[in-house]
């Protein structure tokens, strides 16, 4: 699998990486402000979180043909954007005034005129740790995001839990939506801090019957986002996920914030 880096330079604010990649109309939409109906292409697929905020629930499919006002979303601020070919992936925070109320990620497939042909968004309550910036300032060659992500998912799907955990730094933040179809039950988001906690969680989770397939890698320096699907689920369905990934100076994953729903959204 291959990855590609965009050529845009990051903004000076370390909490707002590469937002220059976001087209103005889409940036306005992500901010929660009214935008023009022309943002969405004819026949666009728009899949947004359930208003109940049940993280892993099926997405709400919205028909944007009646105008952008039919696609409502909370106020937000983009903190990371990365583009690969015609796919733009973002991470941001939801806002109520100056207060952060949640974290969101989204994937948009853009046309030549920056209209959106497919839009998929996830969100969770509360703020996650900010993006680590020390690796951005280190004089080193940035590893390809795809290499470490592919190694991680291959090890995880093969039940090589030590190998999977070794893809993460000693001080990693691993933030995951409520687990489904595993030995860890519950409706709450799960977060593990540090490789030892993560390894214990992988071992508790156990081997699963499903597989992960990543089809978009969008990377900017030490940060990036991926979109993929989970196959092999019960009843023949698949799930969709987006993850925000930050690497440390060794090329290991230091911050991993993931989102998931099922059934998934076709590409």
Image (spheres, rainbow, N blue to C red):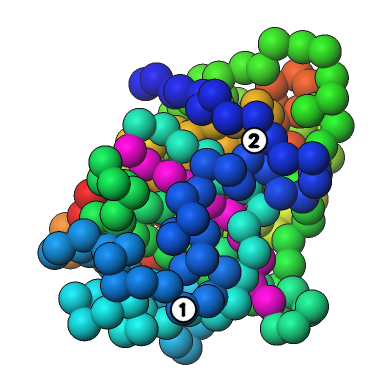
Q: Depth check: give the residue in front, 63 or 104.
A: 63
- In the displayed structure image, the side of residue 55 where residue 130 appears, left or right: right
- In the displayed structure image, the side of residue 57 where residue 247 appears, left or right: right
Q: Which disc number belongs to residue 143? A: none
Could you classify mark 1 by the number of other residues whose Cα lies within 10 Å: few (under 14), some (14-19), or many (20 or more)? some
Query: Which span is picked out in magenta?
Result: 86-95
- Say if the magenta span includes residue 85: no
- In the displayed structure image, the side of residue 143 where residue 211 appears, left or right: left
Whichever of callouts 2 and 1 sits on the residue coming sooner in the sequence is 1
- In the displayed structure image, the side of residue 100 where residue 37 appears, left or right: left
Q: Depth check: give the residue in front, 210 or 48.
A: 48
- Dot 2 lies on which element? strand
Residue 147, horizontal then vertical, whole percent: 51, 20
- Dot 1 lies on which element? loop
Could you classify mark 2 by the number of other residues whose Cα lies within 10 Å: few (under 14), some (14-19), or many (20 or more)? many
Q: Residue at position x 75%, y 19% from top? A: 250
Q: Residue furthest left?
A: 43
Location of residue 97 by image quarter: bottom right
- Above or below, 104 against 213 in this view is below
Q: Residue at position x 64%, y 64% from top? A: 77
Residue 113, horizontal then vertical, whole percent: 29, 46
Q: Which disc number belongs to residue 34? A: 1
Q: Which disc number belongs to residue 223? A: 2
Residue 257, horizontal then vertical, whole percent: 62, 52
Query: Secondary structure of the magenta portion, mostly?
Result: strand
Residue 255 visible in this rendered orientation of the protein:
no
């Amino acid at each position: 699998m291959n990855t590609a880096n965009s050529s845009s330079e990051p903004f000076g604010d370390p909490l707002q990486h590469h937002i220059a990649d976001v087209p103005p109309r889409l940036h306005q939409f992500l901010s929660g402000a009214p935008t023009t109906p022309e943002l969405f292409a004819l026949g666009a697929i728009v899949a947004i979180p359930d208003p109940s905020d049940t993280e892993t629930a099926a997405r709400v499919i919205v028909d944007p043909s009646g105008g952008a006002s039919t696609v409502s979303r909370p106020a937000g601020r983009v903190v990371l954007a990365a583009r690969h070919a015609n796919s733009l992936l973002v991470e941001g925070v939801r806002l109520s005034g100056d207060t952060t109320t949640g974290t969101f990620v989204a994937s948009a497939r853009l046309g030549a005129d920056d209209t959106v042909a497919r839009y998929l968004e996830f969100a969770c309550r509360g703020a996650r740790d900010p993006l680590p910036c020390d690796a951005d300032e280190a004089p080193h060659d940035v590893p390809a995001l795809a290499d470490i992500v592919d190694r991680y998912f291959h090890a995880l799907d093969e039940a090589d839990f030590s190998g999977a955990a070794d893809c993460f730094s000693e001080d990693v933040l691993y933030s995951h939506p409520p687990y489904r179809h595993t030995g860890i039950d519950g409706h709450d988001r799960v977060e593990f801090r540090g490789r030892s906690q993560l390894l214990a969680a992988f071992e508790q989770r156990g081997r699963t019957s499903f597989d992960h397939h990543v089809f978009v890698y969008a990377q900017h320096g030490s940060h990036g986002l991926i979109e993929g699907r989970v196959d092999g689920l019960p009843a023949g369905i698949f799930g969709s996920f987006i993850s925000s990934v930050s690497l440390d100076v060794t090329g290991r994953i230091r911050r991993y914030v993931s989102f998931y729903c099922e059934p998934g959204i076709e590409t």
